[in-house]
Image: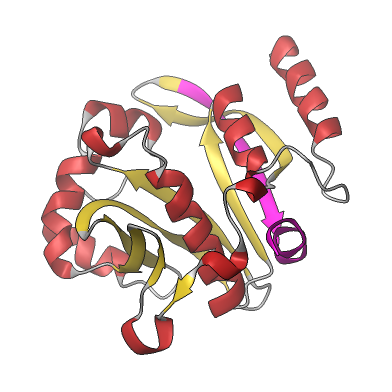
């Protein structure tokens, strides 16, 4: 815990929300590159990758993806484990989920939890479920498209996310989008009898626009 605390202190100094980091994905993504067909087709796309509202016909595949040992270890909180229970889960008013497609093939999900309309903030969650599609940049593109949806389409002011354990790789990847560290909750989550730390990072609309405009 002491070592982890020092590492997080160091990351906090480097991720001051009032300072724009030069080490971001702004060489890969620009706001104007997004093909916005939301009003007509409810689709946002970047090249071959797109997000659109999750369909009920997707639920069986989502169950298969999230019930794997790997997903149940790192994708937390867990989704309901049956198609029947997913329908009311995804239709809750404080959630908003999308299907991620690559060349029109359904490869993952991304969306919002804890939508707070009064404070204009939400929690982002994502999963590239198709194992053959990982490591191809699909998750990065889907993340940028979702942030575009949150900030431009919905006019959300703050997007935050949680990561299990102090995973420096995840922290660095999120940091390259402009997310900054908000805090760490030690031994905050119990999974299969083992305690895990929870890290929270966030990104404001103003900083995102400044980085990617």
Residue drawn at x 62%, y 77% as measured from the top left: 155
Q: Is residue 195 visible?
A: yes
Q: Is residue 167 visible?
A: no
The image shows residue 210 at horizontal and vertical percentages of 77, 61
Instruction: Answer with left or right where residue 120 lies relative to residue 165.
Output: right
**Residue farthest to the bottom, as pictured:** 40
Residue 69 versus residue 35 in the image, above or below = above
Residue 177 versus residue 196 in the image, above or below = below
Residue drawn at x 19%, y 60% as measured from the top left: 85
Q: Which residues are magenta?
A: 195-213
The image shows residue 180 at horizontal and vertical percentages of 73, 43
> How is the model colour-coded?
secondary structure
The image shows residue 56 at horizontal and vertical percentages of 16, 68
Residue 86 versus residue 187 in the image, above or below = below
- Quadrant assignment, res 136: top left
Locate the C terminus by quadrant.
bottom right
On whether residue 209 falls in the magenta region, the answer is yes
Residue drawn at x 74%, y 25% as measured from the top left: 8
């Amino acid at each position: 815990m002491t070592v982890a605390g020092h590492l997080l202190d160091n990351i906090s100094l480097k991720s001051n929300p009032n300072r724009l980091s030069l080490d971001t994905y702004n060489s890969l993504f620009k706001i104007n590159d997004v093909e916005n067909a939301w009003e007509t087709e409810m689709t946002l796309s970047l090249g071959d990758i797109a997000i659109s509202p999750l369909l009920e016909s997707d639920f069986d595949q989502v169950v298969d993806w999230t019930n794997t040992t790997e997903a149940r270890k790192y994708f937390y909180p867990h989704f309901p484990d049956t198609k029947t229970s997913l329908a009311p889960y995804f239709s809750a008013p404080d959630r908003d989920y999308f299907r991620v497609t690559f060349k029109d093939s359904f490869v993952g999900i991304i969306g919002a939890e804890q939508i707070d309309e009064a404070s204009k903030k939400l929690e982002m969650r994502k999963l590239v479920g198709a194992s053959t599609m990982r490591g191809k940049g699909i998750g990065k593109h889907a993340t940028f498209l979702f942030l575009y949806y949150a900030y431009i389409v919905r006019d959300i002011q703050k997007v935050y996310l949680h990561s299990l354990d102090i995973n420096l790789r995840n922290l660095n990847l999120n940091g390259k989008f402009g997310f900054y560290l908000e805090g760490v909750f030690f031994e905050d989550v119990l999974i299969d009898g083992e305690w895990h730390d929870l890290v929270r990072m966030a990104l404001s609309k103003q900083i995102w626009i400044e980085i990617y405009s």
